[in-house]
Amino acid sequence: SKFVNDKWMIKNGFLNDVQEHKPWWWNIKVQKLNLSAPLILLPEVSCQKAIEILQEKGYDQAPVVAESGLILGMVTLSNTLTSVLAGNAEFSDPVMKVIYDQFSKIGLEDSLGKLSCILENDHFAIVVHEQMQFDGNGSSFVKQMVFGVVTAMDLLTFVSRNDKK
């Protein structure tokens, strides 16, 4: 049952603190990772073009975001290549055919402890920042902007470079 699983509770924002003996980095905010701005692909980009862009820019994955700003998923180099080689997608197909639409989001103000719990099950998390936007009528809505993509390697690099021991 999920509600008795502390890691699930932390990942989904129901618990803040679960470890009694937390590592020194547990409560540090995600924003301290100094992530670089991600490369973002629009949903109509072809698999071929996505592969070329990712290889040229040296990225393994990129968020796929609609022009409206809605985060649709993640495209990875390996999944795109595997899908095309297996015949499940064509080079000319849009990346929407090969995206991961199951992904975790984390905010800049969330803790590295929460990130650590997410990365135990997921290969990456999309770092988002919420921004209030107003239209011409003065109506407001919250829009999530992709601030970065974080992997276990990013967390490990931060911890090893800043190890207090």
Image: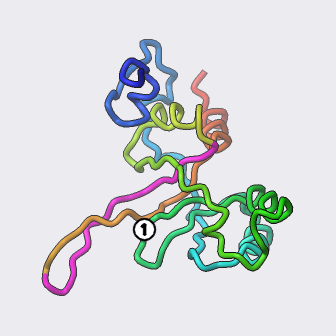
Q: Residue furthest top?
A: 20
Within the image, what quadrant is residue 158 found in? Answer: top right
Residue identifier under label 1: 70
Say if 6 sits above or below 85 in the image. Answer: above
Considering every residue shown, the one lying at the far right of the view is 85
In percent of width and height, residue 87 lies at 82, 64
Crowd rating for badge 1 (residues with CA inside 10 Å; few <14, some 14–19, many 20+): few
The quadrant of the image that shows the C terminus is top right
Nearer-the-camera pick, 65 or 88: 88
Quadrant of the frame with the N terminus: top left
55 to 118, vertically: above or below? below
Asked which quadrant contains residue 60, the reply is: bottom right
Amino acid on which the number 1 mark rests in the picture = Leu
Q: Main secondary structure of the magenta part?
A: strand
55 left or right, relative to 115: right
User: Is residue 2 shown in magenta?
Assistant: no
